[in-house]
Image (cartoon, rainbow, N blue to C red):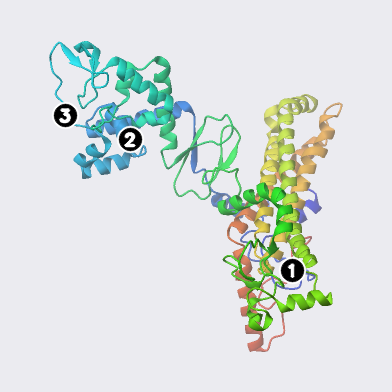
Amino acid sequence: MIDDSEDDFYSGDLSYCYDDPNDNDYYSDDDNDYGLLEDGDEDDQDAMISRRPQLSYTVLKEADIKQRQEDDISKVSTVLSISRVEATILLRYFNWSVSKVHDEWFADEGGVRQSVGLLERPAVQVSNSRELTCGICFESLLHDNITSAACGHPFCFSCWRGYISTTIKDGPGCLSLRCPDPSCNVAVGQDMIDKVATCEEKMKYSRYLLRSYIEDSRKTKWCPAPGCEYAVDFAVGGENFDVSCICSHSFCWNCTEEAHRPVDCDTVAKWILKNSAESENMNWILANSKPCPKCKRPIEKNQGCMHITCTPPCKFEFCWLCLGAWAEHGERTGGFYACNRYEAAKQEGVYDEAERRREMAKNSLEKYTHYYERWASNQLSRQKALADLNQMHTVQLEKLSDLQCTPESQLKFITEAWLQIVECRRVLKWTYAYGYYRPEREHAKRQFFEYLQGEAESGLERLHQCAEKELNKFVTGDGPSKEFDDFRAKLAGLTSVTKNYFENLVRALENGLADVDSQAAAASSKTTSSKNTGGTSKRGGRGKGSSKSGGSS
């Protein structure tokens, strides 16, 4: 079983109050919107399960993709009474949306045919003469050596073969092939490819067509993992964009970066860009720029006057020389191209511009370094956990099964613990990007966030230590241990409560820690009510007089 200290650690919730942190009631059990559940409370457990998001996506193998593509082509061909080749061309034009094809076709069939390049009858009547002239090489050839698309323009097999071979070599653009006649807009379908192309070219064309089914559709994407050939069909309206492919790669379906809840895609893009540029550019920034006095964003000045306006949303106006507010400057301070204050302070030795600039840049760099080092550290820990998980699968589970005389099927709790560690490391990693961009002015939310982050780190370390060090003594033992059942219960319990805590942490951060605002409003209302009634209790009306025994403070 989980020992008392670990149970107490997880008994705290994610609600926040604005009272004295030294008070035993500081972290209250009330308003448990983001709190962890007690193991014995089955109703609350059921409620928690019902709130967990269901999978809103389907991972597709190549066979699944081909089957779906064939089914869509068959639907359109049957409903519109057209050939499968024409149905394929229509679907490609409308990004493989069956509903869009139907809507547009029945609204304006003639307009669709014109746009897509599908003719009801040939534009050119082919002569029945024994010989025909190719429209490209102008050779007169026997009728059997000439063929045409739906438009009827005659070209010899040799010219068709060269035309199609070139376009297929050029890439997926061959899927939008048109008649070689410059004045003709008729689409050339797969039937012509099958008639004149080589086996290799047919395979390439089929491959492009299959890939277009994923790449042109708005609701499907390829898994971005290197070498992975699976695709993901995402249901519109899903609660979150996190996707786990069969290949074990987890990514965000929206931006295709690695899964990054609770951070949004825009923040991830900014953080990745900052990480890639920071190390190379920092020295240049320190030497050639000055940070805005208000937001600390580095600014380069390469021409113009001393009046600087920071970019939105800051828009702070300041003097480039003394870094003072521009509102305090004017003709009396030297105008737009000089600063008397700066010169006077420099002569008196009171103002060291280089030192001030260096200090401001240092503070900005220190903040970034603080968050980046912890972000990177959790990334390394996650990679190590993945390696340990692989080692567990390939070596240790079998060995443990033999030593403890337990079937491997009954050791899944160990794998689940390691999978949870990997997931929690990912979440914890991205909380540092979240914290870096958390506005400094939101002091209460920042304080609450840092508390939750610290609790999450401590809890994850408990689980990691149990799964790694405490398990090791059973793996390296000489035989069955009477303590193994207790270890099983402890590790399974820690895995469960850690999973709940991190799920609720993610939900709280995605909600922008909205409970902090609601708690502040409630506290303000209570204070006003207390003053109006002459009461003296700081915590009047909370409903509980003490916190849970052993709760974190």
Horizontal relation, residue 504 to residue 550: left or right: left
The first of marks 3 and 1 along the sequence is: 1
From the top left corner, tell me how far across and down residue 503 is, in percent: 63, 51
Q: Name the residue under label 3.
A: 121
C-alpha gap between disc 3 and disc 1: 81 Å
From the top left corner, tell me how far across and down residue 489 is, in percent: 74, 41
Q: Mark 1 points at which residue?
A: 26
Identify the residue shown where x is 74% and y is 37%. Answer: 384
Q: Mark 2 points at which residue?
A: 91
State the SS at label 1: loop
The type of residue carrying mark 1 is: Tyr
From the top left corner, tell me how far across and down residue 108 is, in percent: 21, 43
Identify the residue shown where x is 22% and y is 21%. Answer: 154
Using the rendered view, name the quadrant where residue 524 is placed: bottom right
Using the rendered view, name the quadrant where residue 504 is placed: bottom right
Can residue 10 be seen from the camera position used here?
Answer: no
Closest to the observer, 454 or 134: 134
